[in-house]
Image (spheres, rainbow, N blue to C red):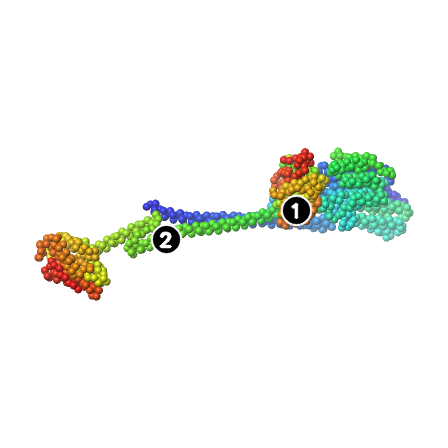
């Protein structure tokens, strides 16, 4: 009897400790969506403490079953992630306890194995439904191809698909991006078989087959996280009631649903995280991480001499003063004939005003990929092909736009890709196809990143082997420190002759000195 | 004269000064270049090379730090952690020492090292916590495992029924799976499984009336703690991995930064060395050029001095010797300096000496009273005339003239008048010798002797007649003469016609002339007597 009493107490205690609830037939729920928060230093993106508050509030006040889905796009690139490969983001997310996390291209910023390690560190499943690791012919180690989350009688199936441009944009060579539509169908089928009541799709590229999938019921709800969604895709996405778009940094989505035999979306609210107070525990963790780099990165190195924009459309759509500075610094440092840098290397997406301080952190944020300098020997034909490759995806702002130093390039954006380069001058002379030139670039481009395939086969120069350990970011910091300022301008080294007749339609928004 | 006098001095002074200045210039130039080289080499040996050495040491220490920090992150137990941390602390001390030697002028390097130090200390604290937690977890798991095993094996209690045994076995297996699990999400799932098993166990135990030993029951409560510890351990591992990555990235950046600085330093050193080598090469060339130039200039100056002084002095010496030996010749040296002046002076001197010599010679061959050649001159002249006559086989006549009763003249008129008389006679005789080859000399006292070259007996007779006529025309009163009231001469002519065959000396010839004079005197004076030999 005494024994049974003790066991009874234990049962109560255990139930209390594990919070075993009576299974209820919950028919409503809330899904919180957040994504694209890579930089805890950036006040636009780094809203984790506020996100935690949102989750707590919704969990506590609504009394409904709450699912927190994180849409990825956060493990990189950022100044901090450049050092710890995104570990701090997982650590912070662990305090937020998402139910599941999807994967975008940015999760591969430090390649597959680092992502696997992050998955091991995470307290939540990380899902990528159409990626196969070629080495094991399975989903990369630590990741899952799908997830089924059961909360209070509701089973939520989760799928996350990714764009095939991953291979060329992030140079991830040991994985294969499988056809997203087919992968989506297979995952949906599996989840339904596993008993998923709701199938939720996360994606980061506006695949045109998604609306049809939603309409057919294969998926119940789609969540597109793309804070850089271009206008051409916006319409078809925003007009569909079951495709939720998170397209602004510093915001989260709250979707209320009901499930009774079928899924029903009740309400969707876009929440400005700035309007919420910061959760103390998460804020403390974030501040701790910030302070570790503050000593290193808060050092002023010079002043902005003029106004500069590193906005995405400015660095990916045409000549940019800041990009010119970087290219010039590379050329000067390596003492080469020319230099090329892709616009996608510049990630700050900021605007800097004249005569304000430049902190080391600013440059680290603008160039978070830790690219290193590479010096190549190329001939004129290879240069032309490289420029064509860079200009090929001009319309999509894909990040391949070539910023140059030591040459003047005339191109026609209205011509088809591969035929856009009109003329190239180096040192005042037209490009000679058979002549050899020395080129300073990054290891990323030299490996064929952003489809710069002509550089992959270019001969490396052996003259500067030691200097190839230099990070581009350090090179730029040194250049600014030496001069005490960053002074650059748009000097018509990349000239779009299609625009020259219609300057009022120019997409360039950078102010010039 | 003063200008001339000074010109050589100044030329010599300027030439010497030029050589000195050139020498001083070349020496200074070489000295300056050598000092420059010395400075460059000093800079290399005292600054650049030590700095490179320090930088290399610094880089080496940083690489070792990277290795040690990885070993720290992978430390499996406290002794390993302590050992690695000890080595890391030594490395930081060494880095601190090296920093003070100004390895890098970039203050950012010091900042990076400080941050790395702080991060490694935090990493160390995390590892310590992790190891402690790992030990606690392992210990708790082992305790619980043992308790379950004891229950299942029946050592603790008897009579546990099969379902309970199965559940305890499931608990044990799930626990072991939990212990091995490295993924946090999986651990959370296993925690739920454990929860389910625990509920089943307690439910099973409540069903039976058995009262097994509940020795393992307290440990069941520990499962919650074990799960929490496991979760915390995995979270800690995640943070550790992140911090390890962070530290390695920091070290990598520092190494890259240092490598860049070392590269800059190396380039500076190489450039300085290359520059120094080029300058040394250039300066060596310049030194050679200047040396050659200085040598050429010095040689030129020496040649100039040689030509200007030595050659001219030698020439002067030769000319002086020549003038001295030959007794004639112009001494002349081109130019308008002391040497040319000396030459001029010498020339004048030589001329003067020659002139004086000539005068003296002339004086030595002249009779001081009458001014006509003296006996000495006659003897020399006779020697030559005799030789000439022998060679040419022409007749030679000698006439010896004596003033008749000259002693009586002196007695009568005095020696002074006697001298005047002699002068007049000498003059008259000379005037009679119209041919240049004829020669008249005072032989001594009142005797005169003449040489008549190429004169035979008939010619001698003509001359005799002329002499007598000339003397007579003088009409010099001579009261002491016993033969005439005026002064008269006695002449003795000796004519030689076969001189080339006759072995006659000058003395012989004079003796014959004297014999002829004697005959003229013996025959009554105031006449000529002719002898032919």
Chain ID of residue with mark 1: A
Q: Quadrant of the N terminus of chain A?
A: top right
User: Which structural element holds mark 2?
Assistant: helix
Q: Classify 10 Å Cα crowding around label 2: few (below 14), some (14-19), many (20 and above).
A: some
Residue A344 visible in image: no
Query: How many angstroms separate mark 1 from mark 2 (CA)?
Result: 79 Å
Residue B399, horizontal then vertical, whole percent: 16, 59
Q: Which residue does the image show at 74% across and 37% down from the upper left? A: A230
Q: Quadrant of the C terminus of chain A?
A: top right
Give above or below for A39 relative to B35.
above
Residue B15, horizontal then vertical, whole percent: 40, 48
Where does label 2 land, which residue? B311
User: Which structural element holds mark 1?
Assistant: helix
Where does label 1 land, which residue? A381
Query: Relative to A165, is A8 on the left or the right?
Result: right
Query: Relative to A122, is A483 on the left or the right?
Result: left
Q: Are marks 1 and 2 on the same chain?
A: no
Residue A261 visible in image: yes
Say which of A75 and A24 sits in front: A75
Q: Which residue does the image show at 20% across and 56% down from the upper left? A: B435
């Amino acid at each position: 009897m005494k024994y049974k009493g003790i066991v009874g107490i234990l049962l109560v205690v255990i139930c209390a400790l594990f919070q075993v609830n009576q299974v209820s037939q919950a028919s409503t729920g809330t899904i919180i969506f957040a994504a694209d928060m890579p930089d805890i230093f950036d006040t636009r993106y780094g809203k984790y403490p506020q996100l935690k508050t949102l989750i707590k509030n919704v969990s506590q006040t609504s009394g409904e079953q709450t699912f927190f889905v994180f849409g990825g796009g956060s493990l990189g690139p950022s100044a901090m992630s450049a050092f710890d490969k995104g570990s701090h983001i997982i650590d912070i997310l662990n305090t937020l306890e998402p139910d599941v996390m999807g994967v975008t291209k940015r999760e591969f910023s430090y390649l597959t194995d680092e992502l696997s390690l992050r998955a091991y560190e995470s307290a939540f499943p990380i899902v990528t439904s159409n990626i196969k690791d070629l080495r094991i012919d399975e989903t990369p180690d630590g990741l899952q191809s799908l997830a089924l989350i059961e909360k209070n009688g509701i089973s939520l199936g989760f799928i996350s698909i990714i764009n095939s441009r991953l291979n060329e944009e992030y140079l991830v060579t040991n994985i294969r991006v499988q056809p997203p539509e087919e992968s989506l169908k297979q995952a949906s089928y599996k989840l339904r078989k596993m008993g998923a009541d709701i199938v939720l799709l996360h994606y980061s590229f506006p695949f045109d087959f998604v609306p049809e999938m939603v309409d057919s019921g294969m998926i119940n709800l789609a969540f597109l996280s793309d804070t850089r969604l271009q206008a051409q895709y916006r319409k078809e996405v925003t007009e569909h009631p079951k495709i939720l778009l998170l397209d602004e940094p510093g915001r989260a989505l709250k979707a209320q649903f009901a499930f009774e035999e079928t899924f029903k979306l009740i309400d969707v609210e876009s929440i400005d995280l700035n309007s919420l107070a910061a959760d103390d525990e998460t804020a403390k963790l974030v501040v701790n991480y910030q302070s570790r780099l503050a000593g290193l990165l808060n050092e002023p190195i010079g002043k902005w001499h003029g106004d500069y924009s590193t906005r995405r459309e400015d660095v990916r759509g045409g000549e940019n003063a800041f990009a010119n500075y970087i290219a010039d610094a590379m050329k000067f440092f390596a003492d080469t004939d020319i230099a090329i840098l892709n616009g996608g290397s510049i990630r700050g997406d900021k605007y800097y005003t004249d005569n304000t301080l430049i902190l080391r952190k600013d440059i680290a944020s603008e160039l978070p990929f830790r690219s290193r300098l590479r010096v190549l020997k190329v001939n004129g034909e290879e240069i032309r092909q490289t420029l064509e490759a860079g200009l090929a995806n001009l319309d999509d702002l894909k990040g391949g736009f070539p910023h140059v130093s030591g040459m003047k390039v005339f191109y026609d954006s209205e011509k088809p890709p591969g035929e856009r380069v009109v003329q190239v001058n180096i040192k005042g002379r037209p490009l000679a196809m058979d002549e050899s030139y020395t080129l300073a670039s990054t290891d990323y481009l030299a490996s064929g990143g952003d489809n710069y395939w002509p550089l992959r086969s270019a001969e490396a120069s052996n003259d500067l082997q030691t200097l190839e350990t230099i990070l581009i970011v350090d090179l730029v910091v040194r250049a600014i420190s030496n001069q005490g300022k960053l002074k650059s301008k748009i000097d018509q080294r990349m000239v779009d002759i299609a625009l020259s007749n219609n300057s009022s339609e120019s997409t360039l928004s950078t102010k010039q000195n | 004269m003063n200008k001339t006098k000074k010109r050589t001095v100044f030329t010599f002074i300027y030439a010497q000064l030029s050589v000195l200045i050139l020498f001083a210039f070349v020496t200074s130039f070489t000295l300056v270049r050598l000092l420059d080289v010395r400075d460059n080499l000093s800079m290399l040996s005292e600054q650049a090379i030590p700095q490179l050495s320090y930088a290399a040491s610094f880089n080496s220490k940083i690489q070792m730090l990277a290795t040690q920090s990885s070993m720290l992150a992978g430390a499996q137990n406290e002794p390993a952690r302590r050992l690695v941390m000890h080595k890391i602390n030594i490395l930081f001390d060494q880095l601190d020492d090296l920093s003070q030697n100004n390895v890098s002028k970039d203050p950012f390097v010091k900042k990076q090292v400080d941050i790395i130090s702080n991060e490694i200390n935090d990493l160390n604290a995390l590892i310590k916590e992790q190891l402690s937690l790992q030990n606690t977890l392992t210990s708790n798991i082992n305790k619980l495992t043992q308790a379950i095993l004891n229950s299942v094996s029946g050592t603790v209690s008897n009579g546990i029924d099969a379902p309970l045994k199965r559940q305890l076995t499931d608990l044990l297996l799930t626990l072991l799976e939990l212990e091995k699990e490295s993924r946090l999400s999986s651990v959370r799932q296993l925690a739920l499984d454990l929860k389910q098993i625990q509920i089943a166990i307690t439910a099973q135990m409540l069903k039976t009336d058995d009262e097994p030993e509940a020795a393992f029951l307290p440990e069941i409560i520990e499962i919650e703690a074990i799960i929490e510890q496991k979760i915390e351990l995995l979270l800690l591992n995640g943070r550790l991995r992140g911090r390890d990555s962070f530290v390695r990235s920091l070290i990598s950046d520092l190494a890259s930064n240092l490598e860049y600085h070392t590269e800059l330093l190396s380039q500076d050193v190489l450039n300085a060395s290359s520059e120094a080598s080029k300058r040394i090469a250039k300066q060596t060339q310049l030194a050679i050029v200047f040396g050659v130039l200085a040598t050429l200039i010095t040689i030129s100056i020496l040649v100039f001095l040689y030509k200007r002084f030595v050659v001219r002095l030698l020439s002067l010496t030769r000319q002086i010797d020549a003038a001295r030996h030959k007794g004639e010749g112009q001494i002349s040296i081109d130019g308008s300096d002391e040497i040319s002046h000396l030459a001029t002076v010498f020339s004048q001197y030589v001329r003067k000496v020659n002139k004086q010599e000539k005068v003296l010679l002339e004086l030595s061959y002249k009779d001081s009273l009458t001014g006509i050649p003296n006996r000495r001159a006659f003897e020399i002249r006779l020697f030559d005339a005799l030789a000439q006559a022998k060679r040419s086989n022409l007749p030679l006549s000698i006439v010896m003239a004596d003033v008749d009763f000259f002693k009586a003249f002196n007695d009568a008129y005095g020696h002074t008048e006697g001298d005047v008389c002699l002068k007049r006679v000498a003059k008259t005789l000379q005037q009679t010798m119209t041919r240049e080859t004829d020669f008249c000399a005072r032989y001594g006292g009142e005797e005169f002797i003449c040489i008549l070259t190429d004169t035979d007996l008939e010619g001698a007779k003509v001359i005799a007649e002329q002499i007598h006529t000339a003397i007579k025309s003088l009409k010099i009163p001579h009261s002491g003469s016993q033969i005439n009231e005026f002064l008269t001469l006695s002449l003795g002519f000796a004519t030689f016609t076969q001189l080339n065959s006759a072995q006659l000396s000058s003395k012989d010839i004079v003796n014959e002339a004297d014999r002829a004079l004697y005959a003229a005197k013996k025959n009554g004076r105031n006449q000529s007597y002719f002898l032919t030999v």
